[in-house]
Image (cartoon, helix red, strand yellow):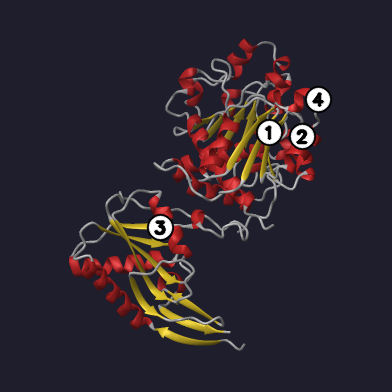
Amino acid sequence: MGKKTVALLDKKAVDRTITRITHEILEKNKGYQDLCLIGIRTRGIYLAKRINDKIKAIEETALPLGILDITMYRDDIFKSKSPEVKKTDIPFDLNNMTIILIDDVMHTGRTTRAAIDAIMDLGRPKKIQLAVLVDRGGRELPVHPDYAGIFYNVSQEEEVLVRLREIDGKDEVIVVRT
Amino acid sequence: MKWNKKDLLGIRELSREEILLVLDSAESFKDISRREVKKVPTLRGKTVITLFYEPSTRTRTSFEIAAKRLSADTINISANTSSYVKGETLKDTAKNLESMRPDVIIIRHSMPGAPHMLSKIVDSSVINGGDGAHEHPTQALLDLFTMREKKNRIDGLNITIIGDIAHSRVARSNIFALRHFDTRITCSGPPTMIPPDLESLGVHVEYDMNKAVKDADVIMMLRIQKERGGVSYIPSIKEYSTIYGLKTEHLKKAKKDVVIMHPGPMNRGVEITDEVADGPYSVILDQVENGVAVRMAVLYLLTGREA
């Protein structure tokens, strides 16, 4: 009732956007040397896997792939009941690696801050770069993505939703207006 | 699934879902203790007090390490160095501690129900670190975590608990926890150490230890509770050890991948021989390692409740 949705990216556009981000990552880093991918739970994991599939198609090599759960590093953790903690799984040494941190939506920057702190407790990477599918603006911390699929400045009455087929059944990015 | 309880007073109050939430959360916390940087900022700014009126090595240290790995500040109070020796009541001690605004108080006391009383007086979360012969909830949770880790399941397991069941808070809490799962629980020990109504908890009683260990997936040994008068229930320690001490030959009757558990402290040569305690089936030190992870999970879940 009274909710309007506007499509930002459909299935094909999601795929094209991920393809572009993949090429940008390889271009900026001049190849895949010492690169690894870390997806932030939940949707970042699937985006990371898809980027890795595309890198494999282009370079014939898959990158080390990790999963990061940032719950223990959140700054709003006790604003409500304890959120469920899930496993971080980074099965490789990230010292001196260039980490491509991958998330679905970039908003306040607080998730990114938490993710950087979590990674720093696991080792000393050479660089961390950030890739997101949607940058929705509204930053509260001085962090910015190195690779952004699309930029859409979300107003107060709007919410941006990323859906991925692995968990949501289909690929799309939509804006919901209340 | 969200955690709603202010306190962890006993396993009896927990649902199967709540038990599984603790175990699942503990999986994530276990990884932290195996990293080079064994600390996360999760409980930064929180204060945890351990208030122990009974001796403890494992439980107190385990809680302190758990709290510190979550970045909480910890203060340890033990009875013999506190105003308890000057005659202060538990109630007054609790109210005074509460004035210093701790977030969690972990209490061990010889009086059953002491944590429950404390929880009514203070706003802080209260964790029962063992109250008399009543309950020891975090021990049961770490025991279930260890069983699930070693056997990949809890449902379907045959668990045999041997020893001074009547005076064991570990046995009680384990029985309350395991009842939520499709397990077969067998208790064994001298008749004087088996409570008469034990079967009403859905537990099998088998006084013959050789029969009790048959087909067991897990054998949990308990020590004689000397501080609760345990020795007066048996003719002699030597006789007890002969009849109810776990020896290598017992293991042949159990499942071939049986695991041996003991909550500690062990009385070697009494309820367990050195060969079994230090042997390949023993997971006693895994229990200690898992204790830290489980207590991290409990501290995390209790602290995160809605104010």
Marked residue chain, label 4: B
Q: Left or right: B307 with respect to B264? A: right
Residue type, numbered disc 4: Gly
Q: Where is residue B43 in the image (x, y as percent from the top left)?
A: 56, 49
Whether residue B121 is visible: yes
Residue at the far front in the pictured view: A142
Q: What element carries label 1?
A: strand
- Name the residue tied to disc 4: B87
Is label 2 in a helix, a strand or a loop?
helix
Whichever of labels 4 and 1 marks the residue nearer the N terminus, that label is 1
Q: What amino acid type is highlighted by mark number 1?
A: Leu
Q: Mark 2 points at which residue?
A: B93
| Residue at point 57%, 44% (across, down) | B72
Query: Quarter holding the N terminus of chain B?
Result: bottom right
**Residue B163 location in percent, x, y?**
63, 24
State how far apart marks 1 and 3 are (Cα): 37 Å
Q: Residue at position x 44%, y 86% from top?
A: A7
Residue at the image position 43 percent from the left and 54 percent from the top: A117
